[in-house]
Amino acid sequence: MIGCSILRISALVRSVLGISPTLAVSVFPAGALAQSTTGASAITMSFVWVEIFSALILLFSGVAIWIIARNQTKRIRELKREAEKLRDADFGEPLRVEPGELGELAAVFNDMRDKLKATTISRDYVDSILASMNDAIIVTGSDGTIKRVNKATSHMLGYEEHELVGTTVDFVVNTGKSGTLVDQKPSGVPREAFFESKFGESIPVSFTCSFLGGTEAETGDRIYAAQNITERRRAEKRIRYLARIDALTKIPNRMQFQHLLQRCIARARRSAKPLCVFYIDIDAFKEINDTFGHLAGDTTLETVAERLSAALPDDTIIGRLAGDEFAVILDELGPDEKGRKHTDALAKQLLSRLADPFFVQGHEVFMTASMGIAYYPKDAPNVIDLIRNADAALYHAKKSGGNLYSYYEPEMNEAAVERLMTKSKLKRSFERDELLVHYQPKYNLETGEVFGAEALVRWELPERGMILPSDFIPIAEETNLIIEIGEWVLDKVCEDFRFWQRSVSSPGRVSVNLSLKQLRQPNFTRRIGSILRSYEVSPTSLELEITETTLMENPERTIKLLNQLYALGLHLAIDDFGTGYSSLSALQQFPISTLKIDKSFVRHVSSNPDDATIVSTIVQMGRNLNMDVVAEGVESEDQLAFLQKLGCTYVQGLLFGDPMSSDSYLELLLAQVEGTDTHRALFA
Ligand code: C2E
Ligand code: MG
Ligand code: MG
């Protein structure tokens, strides 16, 4: 090719000079030919030289062009090779940067490589974070279209990422149970829903949905982080079951019975219909126990539950309220003449069925029972009074000889009169400043250190001695007196706290019980803030204890209020956890940092496997949710050891002594500072 070019170029040179071999012949006449032969050959030679010279120039230029072209091609190939490596995420070494346009291209290329490397590294980093997360992460656009999911999502739902990308988030949601998620605005607040796996399995999840980058303004993209809560649901269900159902007779226990009665009363109120409660107690149950042993006692109780269930319509609510006490709710049975006739017939039938002899371990046991009957609304307007009045009627039937039933009459209930008197006495005592606050220390289970205390109100009456809150708080709660008492307790706690602070730098965190009525006050946050300010006590030194039932009374309002209290710096605890009816997930929406396990579960924790399961599940759940768990009502070293093994955070209870005065608590704190405290040996 180069040879052809050279020929073409020499022809060109010749044409430029206007000289050709034929032209030489035509220019000179024939006579002058010999004479001019020497000159002609010289000219020819010059042409030859010119041609050789041109050919050489052309050859050199050709070689130079070839070398340059080869170099360029090599550089371009190198660039191509590096580009291919980049395509395959292999960043290699930067390219040499030489002068010239290809050098500039190499510099730009290097720059691009660096940027791509940085982006890829951070993308890989994000990828590895996503891949190692246990939560299922789903990223969607503002319209809910899935853009990315992580491994945990595939693991939870059985779909590969490519099967989900491009569908909407509702594709994995059981919208029948949970509604659509696409339409729900991201809030960052934990919520619950049911996801549906590729295999049609419905999976309960707790999830949050937030805007990617924090605000809607950026891209509008959303990120869902979901946790499978099947196990937690199962554990909660078991806790609720164990907490509500009597383990021996498999019928509702007292707490559950009261809850169900509450619902029946609400229904009866709405439909303006009456209802009736039978309170049943086995006559001389103690004798059965003493004569035939506890096993026979247990069989007797099971027999009563079975017989009541068999004799009454299927949906009748039957509960075991205590030891040998049972109760039954009968809907729509009223005190009018017709109702009474039915009630009489049923009461007789039940007593006769219960009196049938039965065999335990080869012994024939004769048992009778007594029964008290009270109607809603005639005899009492609420659960507590209805049960109490049925109990008063039962007492009357027992006193009349047993194996009988009695209807409630107001004069049977001296307690009602007593209650009224207590109410007015309490008001007077409060006005005379005769209430006290005692402190029950809370201990760190790991170190045995005093972590704080719970403030418990006390009422001292000269003629009756110390009255415990369980006997007067419910009465105070019937009126607004509980608000005044509650505020007084807060004030007293802050006053004591400031006093302790003069002697010890950190008196721990003091918790105060709150009643529903206090929380309902419109200006509660402001009041509490002003009490704290007036004593210059930091809000973080205080914890407010609120029961599950109180929390769930009006959740929306309570969340707002608790968020305000939390924003003030106060700690919040759920008191008597396990006795309420809310799911832990529902409680998660509140800014709560502490769970207090009710003492009824702690009491038999080291001897009753059901209670042990409840307590260990609550401790586990608390830990999963980053909450502190306090076990209350610790009375024995066995209980303490069990709780220690579970990894519960704090304990309080009579094992460490009775709740104490403000001065005694200060002494305890001082002893701890000086290292002379004695209780710590218990934790060793
Ligand atoms: P709580 O908040 O669950 O308080 C724990 C109760 O368990 C206290 O009873 C305490 O004395 C008792 N206790 C502590 N350790 C043990 C133990 O080892 N064994 C047993 N059997 N009991 C133990 P207390 O003082 O009678 O209080 C009963 C309830 O009265 C409290 O239950 C709380 O709900 C309410 N209460 C107490 N003080 C106040 C108050 O200032 N305001 C309001 N609203 N309620 C209060
Ligand atoms: Mg409490
Ligand atoms: Mg409690």
Image: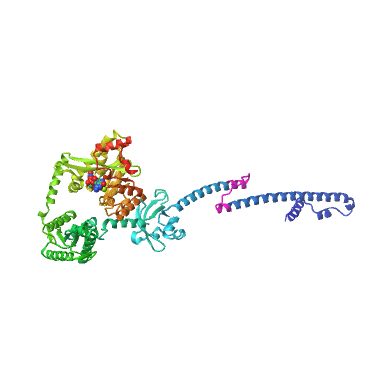
The tally of labels here is: 0
Q: Quadrant of the N terminus?
A: bottom right
Which residue lies most toward the top here?
Answer: 502
544 or 359: nearer the viewer:
359
Position of 275 compared to 234: left or right?
Answer: left
Q: Is residue 93 magenta?
A: yes
Q: Is residue 655 magenta?
A: no
How is the structure coloured here?
rainbow
Which residue lies most toward the left here?
Answer: 411
Residue 121 appears at what percent x and percent y? 51, 49
Q: Which residues are magenta?
A: 84-107
Position of 207 compared to 663: left or right?
Answer: right
Res. 183 in view: no
Residue positioned 58% across, 53% down in the render: 84
Q: Quadrant of the C terminus?
A: top left
Residue 601 appears at what percent x and percent y? 28, 52
251 or 430: nearer the viewer:
251
Residue positioned 28% across, 38% down in the render: 668
Res. 290 in view: yes
Residue 9 appears at what percent x and percent y? 74, 53
Residue 433 appears at what percent x and percent y? 17, 39
287 or 178: nearer the viewer:
287
580 or 456: nearer the viewer:
456
Question: Does residue 440 sit above or below 263 in this rendering?
Answer: above
